[in-house]
């Protein structure tokens, strides 16, 4: 059986389309799985931070402290560098600056 150039071109287009769709599907599935894993890890971390607080009053105190620190940092002049703001945050709430640096980048 002889194949014409048109049939060969159509077959080539079909093969390229199938390969592209397959690679797109694999990429989408991989991205979806990674996104779900990241969301689960974030949710686990957030839940762990709530479990650390012993009581509602302790959580309220933590939220109020972070709000005060945020207000103080917002009052700093715009010329103050990010690193200086993180150092001030670490001084006001020790141990929290690493998370702030991560969130701001």
Image (tube, rainbow, N blue to C red):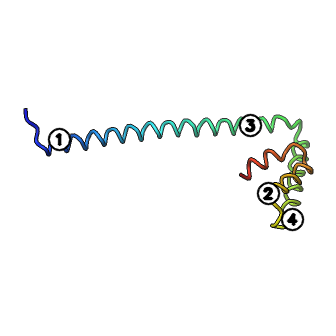
Instruction: Say whether residue 22 is left or right of residue 32.
Output: left
Q: Which tag, 4 or 2, sits closer to the chain's start?
A: 4
Q: Which tag, 3 or 1, sits closer to the chain's start?
A: 1
Q: Determine whether label 4 and label 1 are within 8 Å by CB.
A: no
As drawn, 15 above or below 88: above
Secondary element under disc 1, as helix, strand or loop, is: helix
Label 4 to label 2: alpha-carbon separation:
13 Å
Query: Label 4 belongs to which residue?
Result: 75
Secondary element under disc 4, as helix, strand or loop, is: loop
Measuring from the top left, give residue 16's x and y in whole percent.
30, 41
Residue 44: which numbered mark, if any?
none
Mark in front: 4 vs 3: 4
Q: Determine whether label 4 and label 2 are within 8 Å by CB.
A: no
Q: Quadrant of residue 15?
A: top left
Q: Residue at x 68, y 36 (%)?
A: 41
Instruction: Classify 10 Å Cα crowding around label 2: few (below 14), some (14-19), many (20 and above).
Output: some
Query: Label 2 belongs to which residue?
Result: 82
Mark in front: 4 vs 2: 2
Label 2 to label 3: alpha-carbon separation:
25 Å
Label 4 to label 3: alpha-carbon separation:
30 Å
Q: Nearer the viewer, residue 42 or 11?
A: 11
Q: Which tag, 4 or 3, sits closer to the chain's start?
A: 3
Query: Label 3 belongs to which residue?
Result: 45
Label 1 to label 2: alpha-carbon separation:
61 Å
Q: Residue at x 19, y 44 (%)?
A: 9
Mark in front: 2 vs 3: 2
Q: Residue at x 92, y 51 (%)?
A: 92
């Amino acid at each position: 059986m002889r194949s014409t150039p048109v049939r060969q071109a159509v077959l080539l287009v079909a093969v390229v389309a199938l390969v592209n769709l397959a690679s797109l599907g694999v990429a989408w599935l991989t991205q979806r799985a990674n996104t779900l894993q990241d969301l689960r890890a974030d949710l686990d971390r957030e839940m762990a931070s709530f479990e650390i607080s012993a009581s509602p009053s302790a959580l309220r105190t933590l939220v109020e402290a972070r709000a005060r620190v945020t207000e103080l940092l917002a009052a700093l002049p715009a010329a103050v560098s990010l690193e200086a703001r993180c150092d001030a945050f670490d001084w006001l709430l020790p141990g929290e600056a690493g998370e702030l640096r991560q969130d701001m980048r």
